[in-house]
């Protein structure tokens, strides 16, 4: 018997399992590693009974670059570009979290202007990342790219601002230990002003297009539900946690970079379903715009980079610093042995840990629900695999 | 002025140039002069088929461009604009690329059944054009069971899709095929019922007869039976696998559905037939519900097929619009919508049509007065039915609104969450709900 | 239409019908058999057309090709594979007998009938004629048929509903099997014993 | 602002239910591996500690032993605590799994197992996560792919510094912060021998 015949026989079994209700075996379907809805090389192995998901298991590691090992051989400053590539959709937030941890190790005071600039770019990054997340989420719900392309426009404008500031759009490498690499260029603030002026209208457009859309409601409401207790116990963070109703935002709970000086609110959901996650992200964009407004209005003058020797060796010790990245709690745990490079470099990846409850969220729903759920968690495979 | 008398004796009125049946009669008579009559019927048949193909082929190429351009405009981008003037040659370039691509077949595929579908899918796709009337006597075959023919032919496409999905030996393809079959069987029912309304009311099963009835009574069917029109539109978009009902080739779920394993021009054939079906279904919607080639007398001055094309284009634009706007429904939701909403609603309108037809024929009501009254009544009934359905059919999670609250000063875990949730004042914003 | 065109159509359609029918018997794969059956049905529809019976031809395609064959495909897929292979069945001899009897009687009727009468004029408005005869002359059988179909529909729904409960029970047992014995704690989900190791080839 | 939860208070809570399970050293709470699960469950459920959220779970290879690091957070009381547990057996390192206490530990423990080879007893699905089954060795261990001549992982000095001084003398062990819980130093350095362990 040839292999083809074997496969055929196996397939026959599959066909039966797909259609019969009794005495059948479940069908295993691989979503990914190359699949339109897995946003990268991520593989979800679902066991189906008809269209109902009975088990979901993720297989990851296709993008593993062993960054934590590589970082042990590079100086603290040399590691900043690595953090860009961990979460390539929120490079600024990654830069920031790493720099905060390194600053704690080195005991550096960051000048106030640098803090304000960091907040500005972290919030811009949040807008860009949420635009991507919401756009691809609607795509996973089956829309034909229209909301995605509209939201890409906003993201594009944010990336333009990144480019005029640091020359890069995606992997910015902008933050430095003790501040930021360059001061703001002259043309940035007017661009940002016009961006802030346009955004409310565009958000109103999205809300008109999406929020009352009955099909979107039917697809996302009551899908991928996770309870509040389970969400906390599964260490979920970011919009996924807040959608369950937990008002936990590190910008409020543990303010860094002077977030305590800005007025903003933490939107929380109620049901913990996919639609709430989407709504929370939409609401967070508005809050980010609020913060940006305040940053521009109270932008302090002064140096943007602390005076720090290039070849600084921290004292032996360790530091864990986290920021509220667009995806959740992004932490960096650095251990120093007094050498020029970190002895241990660990990133707490919110994308990976938010997947802890993926199985619980998808079991019992249909295959289409599982995909919507995965889209609503907003994963970045570079961050999962590092 | 040239003397047209010889020609007009064959053609009838001068404007009957546009009527292909006259041309056919001309050719038939000419061949009958010197050859056997079976040759005449074969030659005219082949010419008619070539004519349809000659129209469809180039139209498909333009349609790809139109669809991509329109969708691009919905999405605030330019769309194809590099190959040829305004990107018009882009579809040609795509076709060349698809033809040059390697044809792959899965090793474990059922070879014969795998190779047949891309060709077979063309048969219903082309046949269906045969009964579409472009003018008073301008269709390839004006069958007196045209409506049934349309349904019968479009129903066979399901088998081809099933063959494609089953033989590919791929789970995505099989899922797509099973979904397509289930959906196609289901949505045929409201489609048949919607057309049955027209058949009952106009008393003919010929497609051209339905148009002529609308011409005679000076009314278009979308005004008389709006719900049938809506149901037919939705059912047709489901049969065409277009968003919001494209579950059988849902990209984000099952990659490309039943044609996942087809590469190169085989995929291209599926794609072309899908587009062609979209066009022909738009044409049938225009014919059945918008009056087809007839437009309140304008058809005497403008060639009828131009009127039909404009109406078809409008419906086609509507199909692109829905595709560019709406997300996709889930399988169970789509089935539920068909069986719980469309079938009862269209059935209701079959009964309504039956009663109204009886009033017109047996009671001898004056159509000029009765038809407007019936139209108003039916439109009101349609609105009522839609509102009733929207109220009754909502699934439980959608009945309460989705709320977003602002945490304010509350930051924390379980305890803070409960405090935020127990706040009685209006949440920051809420959407949906009853 | 002249005799030549008619003969051409008749013989090619007859070949298609009979060829498809023989392929049904020859092919071992049931799915293939259904597809050959479809070809045979299409041939019959074409034969109806040569007899100027548009309505019946179209209905033949609509019902047999569009609906019955799809129903058969579903039935095949719903049957466990072990029960599909009928080569060892004891019913083959009686089945052959029945088929032979039916064939003999059909041939008898075909030979015995005076077919000349049909050659006269083609009926034009068949749909109307069929409808009128159904409503006027055969109203009782028509209504009985309708009631029968309704009963079948209700019965099918009743069966399907019962199946629903079974399916729920089955789903629950499958769930329990997948989750292992300690399914109380959502945390302790053991490695699922996936029976099939057929991972998608794509 | 998130405060640091006093390790002494945490140790008190733990020791009240499981005597000897916790000790504080240098401002860090160390937990006895044998009683790790009970201790952390106590800390999670106790009213005053309320450490319901597992922020971060990772490990550090300290050459002679592994240190598994837990960052636990209370959301309502907004304090965080750093907890460590030591695994001294390098050949067969194992630690009780926290996945029964925190569902979020599930993936993070798998990651630590994948990259450090520390087995978490009681983990329901302990398999490699990033690397494939059968990958030789555990890459985040300091002795992974040890170079000949005792060249060590890590960056010994800045590039402009003298290379002779930068690389450590063969056989020497770099200075680590010492504390009483350290296991006694081995009589001779046996760092380089465990190159490329198979997957367990």
Image: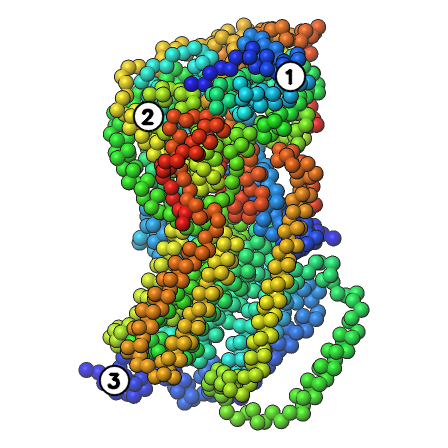
Badge 3 marks a residue whose secondary structure is loop
Q: Which residue is identified by label 2?
A: A263
Answer with the quarter of the image where residue A262 lies: top left
**Cα separation between marks 1 and 2:** 44 Å
Q: Which residue appears farthest toward the front when viewing the image?
A: B424
Q: Are marks 3 and 2 on the same chain?
A: no
Q: Which residue is identified by label 3?
A: B4
Check contact, mark 1 vs mark 2: CB within 8 A. no
Percent x, y of residue C155 = 62, 67
Q: Nearer the viewer, residue A137 or A39?
A: A137
Residue D17 tag number = 1
Lateral position of residue A185 relative to residue A85, left or right: left
Badge 2 marks a residue whose secondary structure is loop
Chain of the residue on which disc 2 is drawn: A
**Cα separation between marks 1 and 3:** 112 Å
Percent x, y of residue C137 = 54, 88
Lateral position of residue D19 relative to residue B88, left or right: right
**Cα separation between marks 3 and 2:** 85 Å
Percent x, y of residue D103 = 58, 30
Q: Residues within 10 Å of mark 3 (few under 14, many from 20)?
A: few
Answer with the quarter of the image where residue A120 lies: top left
Q: Are marks 1 and 3 on the same chain?
A: no
Q: How many marks do you count on the picture?
A: 3
Q: Nearer the viewer, residue C174 or A205?
A: C174
Chain of the residue on which disc 1 is drawn: D
Check contact, mark 3 vs mark 2: CB within 8 A. no
């Amino acid at each position: 018997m040839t292999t083809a015949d074997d496969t055929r026989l196996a397939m026959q079994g599959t066909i039966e399992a797909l259609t019969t209700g009794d005495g059948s075996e479940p069908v295993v379907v691989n979503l990914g590693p190359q699949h339109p809805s897995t946003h990268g090389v991520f593989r979800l192995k679902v066991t189906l009974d008809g269209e109902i998901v009975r088990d979901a298991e993720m297989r990851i590691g296709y993008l593993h670059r062993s960054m934590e090992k590589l970082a042990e051989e590079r100086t603290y400053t040399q590691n900043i570009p690595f953090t860009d590539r961990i979460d390539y959709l929120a490079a600024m937030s990654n830069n920031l979290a790493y720099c905060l941890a390194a600053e704690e190790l080195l005991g550096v005071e960051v000048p106030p202007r640098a803090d304000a600039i960091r907040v500005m770019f972290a919030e811009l990054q949040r807008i860009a990342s949420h635009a991507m997340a919401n756009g691809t989420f609607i795509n996973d719900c089956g829309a034909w790219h229209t909301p995605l392309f509209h939201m890409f426009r906003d993201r594009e404008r944010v990336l333009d601002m990144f480019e005029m500031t640091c020359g890069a759009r995606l992997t910015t490498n902008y933050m430095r230990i003790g501040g930021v690499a360059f001061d703001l260029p002259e043309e940035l603030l007017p661009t940002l002003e016009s961006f802030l002026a346009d955004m409310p209208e565009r958000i109103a457009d999205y809300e008109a297009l999406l929020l009352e859309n009955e099909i979107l409601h039917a697809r996302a409401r009551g899908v991928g539900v996770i309870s509040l207790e389970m969400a906390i116990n599964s260490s979920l963070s970011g919009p996924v946690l807040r959608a369950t109703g937990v008002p936990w935002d590190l910008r409020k709970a543990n303010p860094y970079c002077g977030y305590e000086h800005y007025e903003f609110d933490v939107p929380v959901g109620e049901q913990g379903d996919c639609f709430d996650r989407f709504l929370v992200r939409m609401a967070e964009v508005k809050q980010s715009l609020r913060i940006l407004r305040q940053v521009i209005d109270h932008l302090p003058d002064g140096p943007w980079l602390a005076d720090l020797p290039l070849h600084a060796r921290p004292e032996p010790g360790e530091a864990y610093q986290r920021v509220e990245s667009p995806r959740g709690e992004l932490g960096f745990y650095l251990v120093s042995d007094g050498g020029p490079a970190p002895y241990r470099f660990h990133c707490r990846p919110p994308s990976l840990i938010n997947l802890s409850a993926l199985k619980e969220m998808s079991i019992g729903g249909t295959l289409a629900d599982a995909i919507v759920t995965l889209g609503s968690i907003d994963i970045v495979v570079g961050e999962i695999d590092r | 002025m040239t003397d047209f008398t010889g020609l007009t004796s064959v053609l009838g009125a001068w404007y009957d140039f546009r009527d292909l049946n006259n041309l056919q009669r001309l050719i038939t008579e000419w061949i009958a002069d010197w050859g056997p009559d079976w040759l005449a019927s074969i030659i005219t048949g082949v010419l008619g088929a070539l004519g349809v193909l000659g129209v469809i082929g180039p139209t498909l190429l333009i349609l790809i461009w139109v669809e991509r351009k329109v969708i691009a405009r919905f999405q605030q981008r330019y769309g194809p604009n590099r190959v040829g003037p305004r990107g018009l040659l882009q579809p040609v370039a795509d076709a060349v690329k698809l033809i040059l691509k390697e044809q792959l077949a899965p090793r474990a595929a059922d070879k014969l059944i795998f190779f047949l579908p891309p060709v077979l899918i063309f048969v219903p796709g082309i046949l269906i054009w045969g009964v579409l009337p472009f003018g008073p006597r301008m269709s390839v075959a004006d069958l007196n069971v045209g409506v049934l023919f349309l349904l019968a032919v479009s129903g066979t496409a399901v088998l081809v899709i099933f063959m494609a999905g089953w033989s590919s030996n791929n789970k995505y393809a099989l899922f797509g095929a099973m979904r397509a079959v289930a959906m196609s069987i289901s949505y045929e029912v409201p489609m048949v019922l919607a057309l049955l309304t027209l058949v009952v009311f106009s008393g003919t099963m010929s497609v051209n007869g339905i148009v002529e009835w609308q011409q005679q009574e000076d009314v278009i069917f979308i005004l008389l039976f709006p719900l049938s029109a809506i149901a037919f539109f939705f059912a047709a978009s489901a049969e065409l696998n277009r968003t919001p009902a494209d579950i059988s080739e849902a990209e984000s779920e099952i990659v490309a559905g039943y044609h996942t394993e087809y590469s190169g021009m085989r995929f291209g054939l599926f794609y072309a037939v899908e587009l062609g079906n979209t066009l022909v279904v738009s044409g049938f919607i225009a014919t059945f519900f918008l009056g087809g080639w007839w437009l309140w007398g304008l058809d005497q001055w403008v060639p009828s097929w131009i009127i039909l094309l404009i109406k078809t284009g409008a419906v086609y634009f509507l199909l692109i619009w829905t595709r560019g706007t709406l997300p996709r429904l889930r399988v169970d939701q789509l089935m539920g919508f068909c069986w719980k909403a469309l079938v009862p609603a269209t059935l209701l309108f079959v009964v309504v049509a039956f009663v109204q037809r009886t009033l017109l024929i047996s009671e001898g009501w004056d159509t000029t007065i009765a038809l407007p009254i019936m139209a108003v009544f039916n439109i009101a009934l349609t609105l009522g039915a839609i509102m009733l359905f929207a109220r009754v059919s909502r699934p439980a999670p959608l009945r309460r609104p989705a709320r977003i609250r602002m945490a304010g000063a509350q930051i924390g875990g379980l305890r803070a969450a409960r405090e935020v949730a127990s706040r009685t004042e209006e949440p920051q914003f809420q959407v949906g709900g009853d | 239409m002249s005799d030549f065109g008619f003969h051409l159509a008749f013989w090619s359609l007859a070949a298609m019908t009979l060829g498809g029918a023989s392929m049904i018997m020859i092919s071992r794969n049931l799915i293939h058999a259904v597809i050959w059956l479809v070809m045979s049905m299409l041939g019959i529809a074409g034969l109806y057309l040569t007899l100027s019976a548009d309505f019946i031809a179209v209905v033949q395609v609509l019902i047999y090709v569009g609906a019955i064959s799809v129903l058969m495909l579903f039935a095949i897929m719903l049957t466990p594979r072990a029960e599909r292979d009928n080569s060892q069945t004891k019913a083959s001899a009686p089945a052959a007998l029945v088929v032979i009897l039916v064939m003999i009687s059909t041939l008898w009727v075909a030979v015995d009938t005076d077919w000349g009468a049909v050659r006269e004029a083609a009926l034009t408005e068949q749909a109307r004629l069929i409808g009128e005869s159904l409503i006027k002359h055969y109203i009782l059988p028509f209504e009985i048929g309708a009631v029968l179909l309704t009963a079948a529909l209700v019965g099918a729904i009743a069966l399907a509903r019962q199946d629903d409960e079974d399916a729920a029970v089955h789903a629950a047992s499958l769930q329990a099997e997948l989750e292992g014995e300690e399914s109380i704690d959502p945390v302790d989900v053991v490695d699922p014993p996936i029976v099939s190791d057929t991972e998608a080839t794509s | 602002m998130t405060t640091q939860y006093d390790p002494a208070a945490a140790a008190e809570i733990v020791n009240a239910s499981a005597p000897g399970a916790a000790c504080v050293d240098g401002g860090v709470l160390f937990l006895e591996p044998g009683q790790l699960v009970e201790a952390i469950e106590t800390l999670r459920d106790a009213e005053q500690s309320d450490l319901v959220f597992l922020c971060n779970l990772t490990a550090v290879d300290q050459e002679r032993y592994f240190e598994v690091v837990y960052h636990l957070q209370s959301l309502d009381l907004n304090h965080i605590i750093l907890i460590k547990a030591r695994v001294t057996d390098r050949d067969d390192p194992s630690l009780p799994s926290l996945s029964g206490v925190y569902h979020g530990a599930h993936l993070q423990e798998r990651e630590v197992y994948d990259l450090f080879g520390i087995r978490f007893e009681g983990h329901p699905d302990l398999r490699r996560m990033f690397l494939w089954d059968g990958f030789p060795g555990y890459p985040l261990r300091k002795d992974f792919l040890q170079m000949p001549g005792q060249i060590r992982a890590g960056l010994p000095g800045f590039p402009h510094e003298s290379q002779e001084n930068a690389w450590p003398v063969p056989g020497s062990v770099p200075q680590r912060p010492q504390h009483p819980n350290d296991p006694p130093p081995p009589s001779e350095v046996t760092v380089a021998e465990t190159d490329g362990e198979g997957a367990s």
